[in-house]
Amino acid sequence: MNVQDRRRILGPASAKPLVFANSNEKQSLSALNNDELNFQNGIISNSNGSSIVENNKMSLLTLVYGPRSTRDVSFQPNCKINIIIKSEKFETKNLKELSQFLISVLQCCVCLENYPKSGIDIFINFNIEDEDELVEYIPALVSGCIIALIDANIEITDIIGAITLNHTAVCLGQNGDQLLGLWKDPYKFNNNESGDYDDSIPLSEIIKSCQEKIIVSKQQLIRFISNM
Amino acid sequence: MSELNFELPSRVIPGQLLCPLYVPTEPKVTKYIAGPGTKVVHYDLNNIDVITSTRIGNVQVVEKDLPNNEENEKTTNNDMMLIEISVINKTTSNDSGISNTLSKSNRDKLLPKEGDIVLCRVVRISLQRANVEIIGFQNEPIPIDGGVGTNGHGVIGVNGGSGGATFSMSQSSSDLGETFRGIIRSQDVRATERDRVKMIECFKPGDIVKAQILSLGDGVNYYLTTARNDLGVIFAKSNNGAGNLMYAMDWQTMVSPVTGVIEKRKCAKPF
Amino acid sequence: MSNDLEKTIDIHPVSFTPEVLARISPELSLQKHLSLGFRPSLKGFEEFREIQLNEDFLSRYGKEHKDNNIIGSNVLKCGDTFVVTTITGGIIEDSVVYKNMENELIGVDDIKSTDLSNYTSIYPVVEVERGRAGACTDEEMALSQRLYDYVLYSKILPKEALKVQPGIRITDNNNGNAKVIYPDSSDNSTLPDNVFQISKKWSYLLYAKIKVFSRTGPVFDLCWNSLMYALQSVQLPRAFVDERATDLKMTIRTKGRNATIRETYEILSDPCQQYSLRLHSENIAYASNYGIINLDPEAKITEENSDEDIDMDAIESVLLADLDTEAEENSVNSTISVISNSEGGLKHVSIFGGDAKITPEMLKKLLKLSQKRACYLEDEIK
């Protein structure tokens, strides 16, 4: 590293991080897999709204700040949504792209016109990230944002949801009738090393089965929100 | 017409459908208007407009008068009933004994709107206007901002990293979080003798002022007014904030009971 | 004039709800609370917040087996605030060749030596989540620096404990099976002695990432305590080099026609074998913080409506333990930070004078309190 970060104490530049040799215990990991998501809200007292969404392989903490004033000089009739995702594991460029994707999805349901000249900042922290693919986090990310937004008393018109199937995340609104977004991890298009990616399934099929699945997962979310 | 005898839900969550815009009831057709906490959404699948809830709360319906009789006669022949439907946040009376000071429920308001009474702190005075930052609504617990202590200072001053501020973060030097800012122009300070207002005799930096929102203003500032008896300085310290707490004697003088210092302010009538 | 003054007494004072007053004037709100005998957070003056610990479930050696690079962790919850500390490791080639002879001569006692150069520190990066993006704040930088310094000067982390004793991975030529052999393992007698004669020395480095969520007050003591807990959970993996790499030579720099050739090794960590980090546990201490504030005689006037003369000159001050909430943080200028162990041994004390009247009794008291607090914190981990 040529440019030393002088704000942080990073230690000697010549050090190498620990590299673990390949372990043969990977199988036992996936056996533990439990997809059921658990939700929690309102744990953070210095943000307007917050949520924790976790299962065995991930724990995401979502914080909603605002609506608060922006630095825009001109009058903005609608509010802006910003999302920052913080992760140790994934590359920043992928996270930036993912946050743009999430912004576009959330813009479909947040009542932007209720909050003129302000911004809603959403910070998402990946606290446990044992899942290897970004696409697997999207259902939890979307649920986390929705819960945190409701926790912050920000008005939304729809409880949207996402389902990941065959390495494709599908975001759906209006009980699955409205397609809001589609995400595939960039490298997945060219690279099929793991072999579990079946590219023979047409996209329409995937969307269809996601529409069926979303009803179940949304019911779980609604049950939680009703008790908030 | 299956929706003919539909029932409104009592407790709703965001995204829950409440009712279509028009319901063909007897003897009049009912038209619903989306009030606070609701929004009209178009459903593509059925191609209809419906009102959906946008927050957690209880549904409230209020019958409204038809706005303009003459026009309505022409179009709908008085066969319409207007009902405003809104969702009111649950109240926090019986949660768990001691109410949490940071309790997040019961905060319908997140942003100031025109006509709202707000509390603000004076940050800058010029001949023409006073710049303020809005720190709260009149009777409501801490609103607006995303944070207690988001910008707190301890042993070390913390105003964020230098230069790193992207986002909706203000540059305000305040020790509160990201506040909304406002302006009280000299002609909005009081209702009488508006041309003779001397800003320095009305406000001092650090004063807490009760003011009303005139307009949303520009991108940065709300425009505020104190031209009413009950509006003005409610909390001030003498000697530009270094001295003791002062109390209002009349609408333009404040006195510190400890030191006897008298200073000029545009005071709010305290009762 | 006196008429005027009487009139002012008639005027109703403006009243605010406690939340609004705390927002408008944190200082007055604090003083009002103090005059009633408790703090805005409803704690007593010398009351600490309780803590909750989640011991090491984030690391690869934690309760749930994970495949990550974290070798120690801790989640500490204190009031509303919680601190997540994760410790990762690195390996560095020792540039200064150890004076092997010397070390061996002095032997084990060398570790106990009080010489600071025998100790090292952890490289901490603190992040306080407050809804901001961009560069780290002054507070974060100061916290990281303090943590680094105090770990070093507390002499918790001996360099000796971080030395790597690399094993060697030997690939059997017959069946291609790889096997890792360590110098201290029992079956190394079959190997020639010179296998472990690697001319390079390595040391582990420890990095801590400390994330603070829901900050409500000063957080140094929380970060420190969480770091202490996390350090005690650290397991260092055994490391090995591949047999084939032991005599690999590599050009690392070319300048014109001159090339510098150096031996390099790829050093790998064993995913299955690890051992606990040997800290100097008698040097582990826990932090607590205190504030001293002068009571504002004015805040009492309205409270008691007393006729008695209030002596404005007699300044009274109170000691507050475990500062929390915005009001206390902003209004209390005299702060004291203590790192103490359960026997009352002090590792660090810093006193910021501020404007309050600090009496020797208070200092005695707070030292006693820190010892008690350290006892409590020490018991939590057992």
Image (tube, coloured by chain):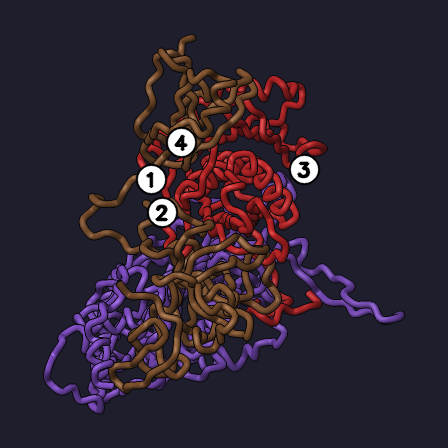
Disc 4 crowd rating (10 Å Cα; few below 14, some 14-19, many 20+) is many
* Measured Cα–Cα span from mark 1 to mark 4: 20 Å
Give C178 or C226, whichever is nearer the viewer: C226
Disc 1 crowd rating (10 Å Cα; few below 14, some 14-19, many 20+) is some
Amino acid on which disc 2 is placed: Arg
Colour seen for chain B: brown
Which quadrant, please, contains the N terminus of chain C?
A: bottom left
Q: Are marks 2 and 1 in contact (CB under 8 Å)?
A: yes
Amino acid on which disc 3 is placed: Pro
Which residue in the protein does label 2 denote?
B107
Q: Is residue A95 found left or right of C20 in the rendered image?
A: right
* Measured Cα–Cα span from mark 2 to mark 4: 23 Å
Q: Disc 4: which chain?
A: A
Residue C64, compared with residue C310, is above or below; it is above
Residue B89 bears which disc, if any? 1
Give B161 or A21, whichever is nearer the viewer: B161
Residue A186 bears which disc, if any? 3
